[in-house]
Image: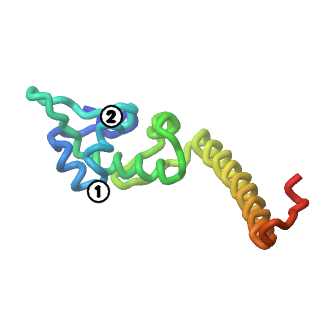
Amino acid sequence: MKANPGGSGGRAGMRIGELSRVSGVSARALPYYEEQGLLVPERASNGYREYAEDAPVIVAQIQGMFSFGLNSETIRRYLPCARGSEPRLQMCADLRAHLQQRREELERHTAQLLAQRKVSRRVRQIPSGGLYEGLL
């Protein structure tokens, strides 16, 4: 069984509540990961989800990738770069390029926000009814 497309598989048997408790991720988030193709449990004969023993590590890897600001589609693409028995990413070339691009986007966005904050501070200093010529 594979817990995700890049997972190492392993024995199934952990149910959603146990995985939620062990991983610290809500039981509501886990079916979302399944829906997004990030985590693929098996189904028991009674229909319950059963996750592989490596599922807590995979969930931690998914969470780490979300914390980088990656969306589900991007995580699905690069989850195979997540390897090992701990939440780690092997820096494959495509992932490195994507993260570099994301960092550059964040830096541009940060610069825009800082510029807007600077204008906002100037506007706050204008007395009521005063004029601010820098807006136009």
> Dot 1: within a 10 Å radius of its alpha carbon, few (fewer than 14), some, or many (20 or more) residues?
few
Please state which of residues 112 and 98 is positioned toward the viewer in this rendering: 112
* In this view, 13 is above or below 103: above
- The residue where tag 1 is placed is 24
Whole-percent x, y for residue 1 in the image = 24, 32
Give the secondary structure at mark 1: loop
Name the residue at 28% across, 50% down.
26
User: Which residue is farthest left?
Assistant: 46
Whole-percent x, y for residue 134 in the image = 88, 59
- The residue where tag 2 is placed is 34
- Mark sitting on residue 76: none
Mark 1 or 2, nearer chain start? 1
Q: Amino acid at mark 2?
A: Glu
13 vs 89, left or right, is left
73 vs 20, left or right, is right
Name the residue at 85% across, 67% down.
130
Give the secondary structure at mark 2: helix
Residue 113 occupies quadrant: bottom right
Q: Amino acid at mark 1?
A: Gly
Please state which of residues 128 and 113 is positioned toward the viewer in this rendering: 128
